[in-house]
Image (tube, rainbow, N blue to C red):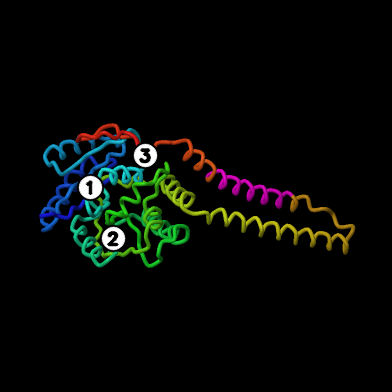
Amino acid sequence: MYLEKISVVIPCYMSEGFIESTVNEIVAVLENMDGYDYEIILVSDSSPDDVFDRISGISNSNAKIKGLELSRNFGQHVALLAGYREATGDFIVSMDDDGQTPASGIPILLEKLKDGYDVVFAKYKNPKQAGFRRWGSNLNQRIMDWGLSKPKSIDATSFFILKKFICDEIKKTTIPFPYIAGLVFRTTQNIGNADVDHRERAGGKSGYSINKLFSLWLNGLTTFSIKPLRIATFVGIIVAIAGFVGMVLVFINWAIHPDAPLGYSSTMTVMLFLGGVIMLMLGLIGEYIGRVYISINNTSQYVIRKTTYENTRNDE
C-alpha cells in the first residue's frame, strides 16, 4: 500500500546543543501519524559549531534522516532550497531548528492543507519572540504585503507546508538570491493559515541581526518586485516639480524685491537634498544591476561540502 510521504526540511545554524531534541520530537510526532511515511532533511548552513557532527550521529541512528553541510554560510533561504532539492515527499514541511515551532503543529498544517490549499503557513497564537525580532517579523509581513503580493489576510512564517508541485516549481529557480516566500507567492495565491502554538527558543539566540534582516528584506524586494524602482521614479517626479515651483517662487521674489540678498544657505540645502536623493536612487538601481550581473555570471546558489548519504550533486 502506498503511503503518502512527509519531508521535513530544517536549516541548522548554531544549534548543536538542541538539534537532537528537536529532531526526536519531530520523529515522535511523525511516527504516530497513521498512513504517512516521512523523512527529515537537516541542512547545516556551514555552522561554526559541531552541529553537523550531531546531524551525522542522528542520521546513523535513523535511516529516514538525511544531513548535508554547505561549504559556507549561504543563508537560511538557500539552505531551505538545498533541502527541497533532496526532498522526495508528497508534502514538504519547513521548520526552524530552535524548537520554537512544536512538531505537534505538523498534523495541524497538513489537515489544513487537505482543505484544498497549496501552501499553509503557521499562524502563531502566542508569539514568543523578543521585541526586536517581533518588530522585524511584523515589518517583514508589511514588506511582503506591499512588494511581494502577499495576501494581507495571510501571516507568512518560517513554519509552513507545501504540496509537492509547489516545491517542484520552487526548485527550478536558478537565481543566486532565492527568497522562499517570494517564490511561493509567485507560484500560487491559494494559501492558508493554521493556528499553531509558539514556544521559547530551546537555546541560543536568533541568528538574524539588523544587518541580516535588512539584507533579507532588500533581497526579497529587489528579486521579486520593481516597486522600489517605481518609487524612485515617483520621488524623482516630486522633486522635479518641487524644484520647478521653487524656481518660479524665486523668480517672483526677485521681480518683487530686486535688491533682496541671494540665499546661499538655502541653495546649499537644496543641493544637498537633491544630491542625497540622486545618490539614494543610484544606489537602488545599482542593487538591481548588481543582482542581474551576478545572476548572468552563473554564480552558484550553494555548494554542498558533504552529506550523510550518497549524493552525486555538489553544485546547484
Q: Residue flagged by tag 3: what amino acid is it? A: Phe
Q: Which residue is mark 3?
A: 74
Circle 2 or circle 1, nearest the eye: 1
Indicate the position of residue 9 as horizontal and vertical percent values. 25, 48
Residue 165 lies in what quarter of the image?
bottom left
Does residue 208 appear to the left or right of 311 in the view shown? right
| Cα distance in 3D space between marks 2 and 1 | 22 Å
Indicate the position of residue 35 as horizontal and vertical percent values. 12, 58
Are discs 2 and 3 less than 8 Å apart at CB? no
Count all numbered tags in the image, as a single digit.
3
Q: Residue flagged by tag 2: what amino acid is it? A: Ala
Q: Which residue is mark 2?
A: 122
Indicate the position of residue 202 as horizontal and vertical percent values. 22, 49
Are discs 1 and 3 less than 8 Å apart at CB? no
| Cα distance in 3D space between marks 1 and 3 | 23 Å
Does residue 3 appear to the left or right of 46 in the view shown? left
Q: Which residue is found at the position 78% from the left and 50% from the top?
A: 264
Are discs 2 and 1 less than 8 Å apart at CB? no
Circle 2 Cα neighbour tier, 10 Å, few/some/many (<14 / 14–19 / ≥20):
many
Dot 1 or dot 3, earlier in sequence: 3
267 and 8: which is toward the camera:
8
Q: Residue flagged by tag 1: what amino acid is it? A: Thr
Residue extent of the magenta highlight: 268-287
Residue 99 - label = none
Q: Which residue is found at the position 19% from the left and 35% from the top?
A: 309
Does residue 88 appear to the left or right of 183 in the view shown? left
Dot 2 or dot 3, earlier in sequence: 3
Residue 1 lies in what quarter of the image?
bottom left
Position of the C terminus, as image quadrant, is top left
Dot 2: element: strand
